Amino acid sequence: MKSSRRLFSNCFIGLMLFFSFTGSAGAAEYDGVIEPFRVVKVGSSVYGILETVNVDRGDFVKKGQVLATLQSGVEKATMEAARARVEMEASIKSKQANLDFYTRKKQMNEELFKKQVLPFSQMDEVETSKILADMQLQEALENKRLAELEYKRAVEVVNRMTIHSPVNGVVVERYLSPGEYIENQSVLKLAQIDPLNVEVVLPVNLFPSIKIGMKAKVIPEAPIGGQYMAEVKIVDRVIDAASGTLGVRLELPNPNHRLPAGLKCKVIFPEK
């Protein structure tokens, strides 16, 4: 009698284990977690005082959107001064006019020199003046080029004091507020949730059958529910010997951010 009960109990436990890892039509089902595709802590590459923080926790942001700015009055003034130097054309125009004058003068003097009306010393003086005028023009052009580079540098300095979003996503945490000093700190924490990652741990015996690119069904926990298709992107090549398992990551499209990250889920792989 006891052996019959023990046999029944063992059969019952075996059936429970079977159904816990088996979905409809014999498809394997495993526990998983839906996570953000990418989590980014956003800060500044320069130190200073925060002037604005334009978003808060829960706000959706787009890639390239201005999230925060540092006080940059001095840097902007330097940029404007550099821009003004770039736009200055008087020096180049005057040097060009001087060169044109000596070019014409040399042409006229060459005719006189050929006719032996003009002495060599005057001809040499005109040629030297033209060479000097040409060098002065080149110097003015080089100064303009340096001014352009200085302006470009000033613009980059100002841009580095503006913090942009590197991803399309949602603000997870806001660490600092306007008026606070920032140095080697994060201002915001962002999460990209389209697509989503689905992390699942599988028994090692499934390693030969799980392939990158294969599809699987993802069922988020209640109250979200529903069924969604995800694609295998990563299959770990290092097995956890202690538990006899391996990690697998799937990518789940999430247009319009209809699914939140951080959910538990069931992952059903197709029957082989």
Image (cartoon, rainbow, N blue to C red):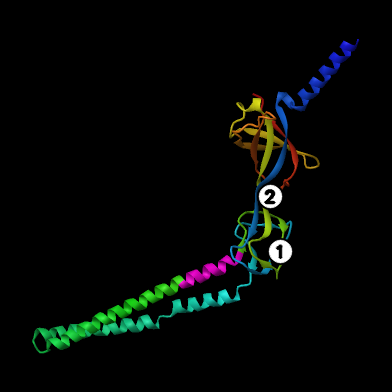
Is 160 contained in the magenta span? yes
In the depicted view, which residue is nearer to us: 44 or 64? Answer: 44
What residue is pinned by disc 2? 256
Q: Secondary structure at mark 1?
A: loop
Provide residue 122's location: percent of width, then percent of height.
16, 88
Residue occupying the far top of the picture: 1
Where residue 231 sits: x, y (%)? 62, 37
The part of the image, by quadrant, that contains residue 121 is: bottom left
Place residue 170 in its image quadrant: bottom right
Q: Which residues are magenta?
A: 150-162
Residue pictured at 69% horizontal, 44% vertical: 35
Are there few (<14), some (14-19), or many (20+) residues within 10 Å of tag 2? few
Q: Is residue 48 magenta?
A: no
The local secondary structure at tag 2 comes to helix
Kind of residue sitting beneath label 2:
Asn
Instruction: Find disc 1 in the rendering and name its residue.
Output: 176
